[in-house]
Amino acid sequence: ISYICGLFARQRFNRTNMKPAYLYLFLLGALFSITSCLDDPEVTAWRKANDEFMLSLRDSSEFKPLEYNDRILYGDENYNYLDHPVSGIYYKTLVEGRGAVPLVGQTVEVEYEGRLYDGTVFDSGSRTTLVGTGVISGWSEVLYRIPQGSTWEVAIPYHLGYGEVKHGSIPAYSCLIFTMELVSIVED
């Protein structure tokens, strides 16, 4: 790398022959691109384990899927209510609440604990958030459904979490398991 950078530095001042330096830089960039696309065995194993965990929930008698045909009241700016599809989230009711289900744009208070499929806790606490914004897609999908006073355990696939990139202590391709209690819908 230092050899190529040296070539580029020398060529920078000799503008009559800059093509070789740019060719070296192009080749170096291509090499880095190719090697970054190769799968890291640890990442591949982690993704496989997470995928298998999510598949195991499909056959579970405890967890239910949030399916495409579930109806969610999703109000647009003209108060037209639309279906809002979801995919791949599984949930288990720990405490059944009887309160209202929040709508997009309402503020809610949630107590939660987040962990990885292997039990590693990555976050916990209380959060006040506007439904539909400021959280991962999987959280939004759950908040469209959970009645006030309920506590659910939810498993969110990686594509509705942080996806294919590492996020703090959360590895890439991580499904996220949350214990979520919808404490209240905050009145404005």
Image (cartoon, helix red, strand yellow):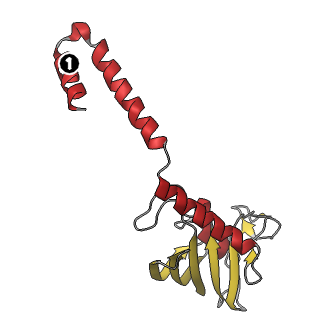
Residue at (80% x, 70% y) in the render: 71
Q: Is residue 133 above or below residue 10?
A: below
| Residue in the image at 27% along x and 13% along y | 18
Q: Which residue is mark 1?
A: 12
Give me the residue at 75% from left, 79% from top.
60
| Horizontal and vertical percent position of residue 96 | 71, 92
Residue 64: image quadrant is: bottom right
Q: Position of residue 153 (x, y in %)?
A: 63, 82
Q: For the residue marked with disc 1, what is the amino acid?
A: Arg
Q: Is 131 above or below relative to 92?
A: above
Question: Where residue 56 appears, x then y in whole percent?
Answer: 70, 72
Between residue 66 and residue 182, name the one nearer to us: 66
Asked if residue 135 can be seen in this view, the reply is yes
> Tag 1's secondary structure?
helix
Looking at this view, is 3 or 175 the one in front?
3
Q: Is residue 7 toward the left or the right of residue 22 in the image?
A: left
Quadrant in which residue 130 is drawn:
bottom right
